[in-house]
């Protein structure tokens, strides 16, 4: 058994009152790069929909952006199956895995999908 502690970053992409969505995305990229430099294991996106103060709801769209800006840290998030057809999720995240082999994690969430 390993005694090594594995740390990950969970990022919902909060848009602060003094930020635009673009500023928030840039902050998220910087956080992922910092996490990689500090030795974090994973950068995990938290999917939330219809929340004005959250920028990063589409995990399958933003995970590749993080992957392209980093070289080692694992990327991914939890995708809510109530919002997407399962085959679409499999195809999208399969493409992300093909672009960043061995670095992608996917969680499958279940929600009512209610706003």
Image (cartoon, rainbow, N blue to C red):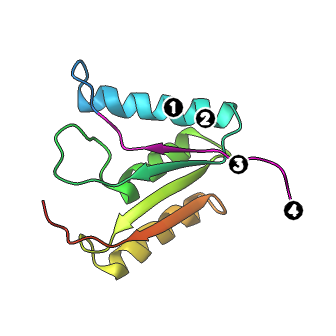
Give me the disc on residue 6: 3
The residue segment tinted magenta is 2-14
Residue 47 pos. (x, y %):
33, 55
Marker disc for residue 1: 4
Within the magenta stretch, is there residue 4? yes
- Give the image location of residue 72, x and y in percent: 68, 46
Q: CA distance from mark 1 to mark 4?
A: 30 Å
Does 62 sit left or right of 101 as displayed?
Answer: left
| Quadrant of the rendering where the C terminus is positioned | bottom left
Question: Residue under circle 1?
Answer: 31
Residue at 47% x, 34% y: name it: 29
Q: Position of residue 58 (x, y in %)?
A: 31, 55
Eye-nearest disc, 2 or 4: 4
Q: Looking at the image, is mark 1 or mark 4 earlier in the sequence?
A: 4
Magenta region's main secondary structure? loop
**Quarter holding residue 1:** bottom right
Q: Label 4 crowding class (10 Å Cα cut-off): few <14, some 14-19, many 20+?
A: few
Q: Between residue 39 and residue 67, name the one nearer to us.
A: 39
Q: Are marks 3 and 1 in contact (CB under 8 Å)?
A: no
**Quarter of the rendering containing residue 87:** bottom left
The first of marks 2 and 4 along the sequence is: 4
**Is residue 95 magenta-colored?**
no
Residue named by callout 2:
35
Q: Label 2: state its secondary structure.
A: helix
Q: Are marks 1 and 2 in contact (CB under 8 Å)?
A: yes
Q: Earlier in the sequence, mark 2 or mark 3?
A: 3
């Amino acid at each position: 058994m390993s005694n090594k502690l594995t740390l990950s970053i969970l990022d919902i992409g909060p848009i602060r009152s003094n930020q635009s969505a673009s500023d928030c995305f840039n902050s998220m990229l910087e956080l992922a790069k910092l996490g990689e430099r500090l030795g974090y294991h994973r950068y995990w996106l938290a999917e939330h929909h219809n929340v004005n103060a959250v920028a990063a709801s589409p995990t399958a769209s933003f995970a590749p952006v993080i992957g392209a800006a980093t070289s080692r840290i694992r990327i991914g998030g939890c995708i809510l199956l109530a919002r997407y057809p399962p085959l679409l999720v499999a195809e999208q995240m399969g493409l992300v895995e093909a672009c960043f082999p061995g670095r992608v994690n996917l969680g499958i969430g279940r929600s009512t999908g209610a706003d």
